[in-house]
Image (cartoon, grey):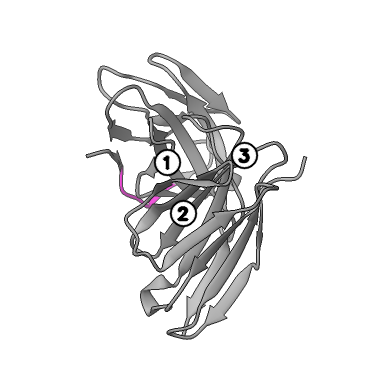
Amino acid sequence: GNSVTQMEGPVTLSEEAFLTINCTYTATGYPSLFWYVQYPGEGLQLLLKATKADDKGSNKGFEATYRKETTSFHLEKGSVQVSDSAVYFCAFTGTASKLTFGTGTRLQVTL
Amino acid sequence: EAGVTQSPTHLIKTRGQQATLRCSPISGHTSVYWYQQALGLGLQFLLWYDEGEERNRGNFPPRFSGRQFPNYSSELNVNALELEDSALYLCASSPWEGPGPQHFGDGTRLSIL
């Protein structure tokens, strides 16, 4: 069935380190892919999206490329900040419009 | 532009009671989605409403129900509350049905005592 697999956290990095959070999906058809971020006590914020193969979504220094051949959508950032500490969710929508989420990856950035 | 708004922020109930959660979508959005974020269970899709109709339903019992009003706002009702219903309930909206991004509110924290 449809699912999203994310790397387990927590991920702990020093400020200015490089970030990669892996995400792979299993879906029928041609899903749209998303990364959402959840800060403590808040709802989900859309971070970036990609709607077709080879699209690169980017926002606030974060990037992810839609790789259909590997069914992946890995999140990267070249230099993380303390303010990036949050939980990151990879997700997709297919023909049923509902979002299918990964389990989330907690990122903790320290000085 | 106002975002998705949910009320109340927190709701405390006891087992067997009924809870009503409310959601106002972004202006111009016709689709409303409900998700449950329970500890250890991740984010689970509950319900999708578009143009006043229930379009899709997740794997939840019938005591989870809802509706969408003509102004596109929505209610989620949970009857016969159980302890495991304790969770953050998130509402999202999108401008039309289809695989576009959904925009989320801050959620209602439902606690069952």
Left or right: residue B32 versus residue B81 is: right
**Residue A78 visible somewhere in the drawing:** no
Task: Please check whether the numbered discs 3 and 1 fall on a single chain.
Answer: no
Residue with the mark numbered 2: B35
What amino acid does circle 3 point to? Thr
| Magenta extent | A7-12
Q: What element carries label 2?
A: strand
Q: Are marks 1 and 2 in contact (CB under 8 Å)?
A: yes
Which dot marks residue B30? 3
In the image, residue B61 sits, relative to residue A60, either above or below, namely below
Q: How far apart are marks 3 and 2 (CA)?
A: 17 Å
Residue ranking furthest to the top = A54
Q: How far apart are marks 1 and 2 (CA)?
A: 9 Å
What amino acid does circle 2 point to? Tyr
Chain letter of the residue carrying label 1: A
B22 or A35, which lies in front? B22
Which dot marks residue A26? none
